[in-house]
Image (cartoon, rainbow, N blue to C red):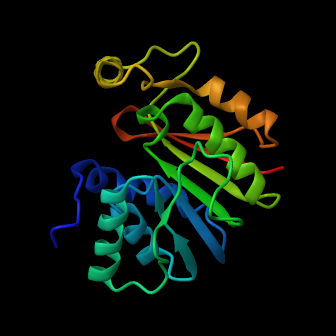
């Protein structure tokens, strides 16, 4: 299908992410994915968790078309039509969720998108529900990998508002919004899985 996008990074990281999600996802309910991108992650996870209902979203029309194309091709029944949702917006079209996923958005978006993500998640998640984040981060006291430094420079050359974020800064935002300290898992290619839970 002409609308269907494919990102090589998704094929490389989806199984590693899935291995973490198996210990994170609820047994039932709705999983909202923020910044679903191509839609490749959501179809992979929907296959793995047939008992969950997935709600993909993205602020970009080409991504929404790609998500719809992937859902149509895979014929998975536990994925809803994608929502146009900008994480930075003070109001979201999704009003409740039992888990939220956000993969590779925080470093490729302005900081206000991260602020909106945390605030929006705090509004719609119930106590104990997970907010799962994946991507590269800076960590105090840990030397950033040269590949991540080069990636950061590349991102900032494309948009001065993009770039690797401090995990401590994200954790502070989450704490103030009513989330737990994060459970952090080292992932391939110098990425992290970061799981906050609503208190």
Q: Say if 80 sits above or below 173 in the image.
A: below
Q: Say if 118 sits above or below 4 in the image.
A: above
Q: Say if 42 sits above or below 52 in the image.
A: above
Q: Is residue 177 left or right of residue 147?
A: right
The x, y position of residue 121, in whole percent, is 69, 51
Tell which of 117 and 127 is nearer to you: 117
Residue found 38% across the figure and 61% down from its top: 41
* The quarter of the displayed image where residue 126 is located: bottom right
* The quarter of the displayed image where residue 135 is located: top left
Tell which of 71 and 133 is nearer to you: 71
The x, y position of residue 133, in whole percent, is 55, 45
The x, y position of residue 166, in whole percent, is 56, 23
Q: Is residue 162 left or right of residue 88?
A: left
Quarter of the image with the N terminus is bottom left
Residue found 71% across the figure and 43% down from its top: 119
Q: Is residue 100 left or right of residue 143?
A: right
Residue found 64% across the figure and 35% down from its top: 115
Q: Say if 145 sits above or below 17 in the image.
A: above
Q: Is residue 27 left or right of residue 108?
A: right
Residue found 58% across the figure and 37% down from its top: 114
């Amino acid at each position: 299908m002409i609308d269907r996008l494919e990102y090589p990074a998704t094929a490389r990281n989806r199984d590693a992410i899935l291995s973490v999600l198996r210990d994170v996802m609820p047994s039932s309910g709705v999983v909202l994915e923020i910044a679903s991108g191509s839609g490749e992650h959501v179809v992979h996870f929907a296959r793995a968790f047939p008992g969950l209902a997935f709600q993909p979203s993205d602020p970009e029309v080409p991504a929404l078309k790609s998500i719809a194309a992937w859902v149509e091709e895979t014929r998975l029944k536990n994925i809803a039509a994608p929502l146009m949702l900008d994480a930075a917006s003070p109001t979201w079209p999704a009003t409740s969720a039992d888990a939220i996923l956000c993969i590779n958005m925080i470093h490729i978006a302005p900081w206000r998108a991260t602020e909106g993500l945390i605030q929006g998640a705090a509004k719609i998640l119930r106590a104990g529900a997970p907010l799962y984040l994946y991507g590269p981060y800076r960590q105090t006291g840990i030397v950033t990998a040269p590949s991540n430094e080069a990636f950061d420079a590349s991102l900032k050359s494309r948009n001065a508002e993009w770039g690797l974020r401090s995990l401590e800064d994200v954790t502070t935002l989450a704490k103030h919004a009513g989330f737990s300290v994060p459970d952090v898992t080292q992932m391939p290619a110098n990425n992290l899985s970061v799981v906050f839970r609503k208190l």
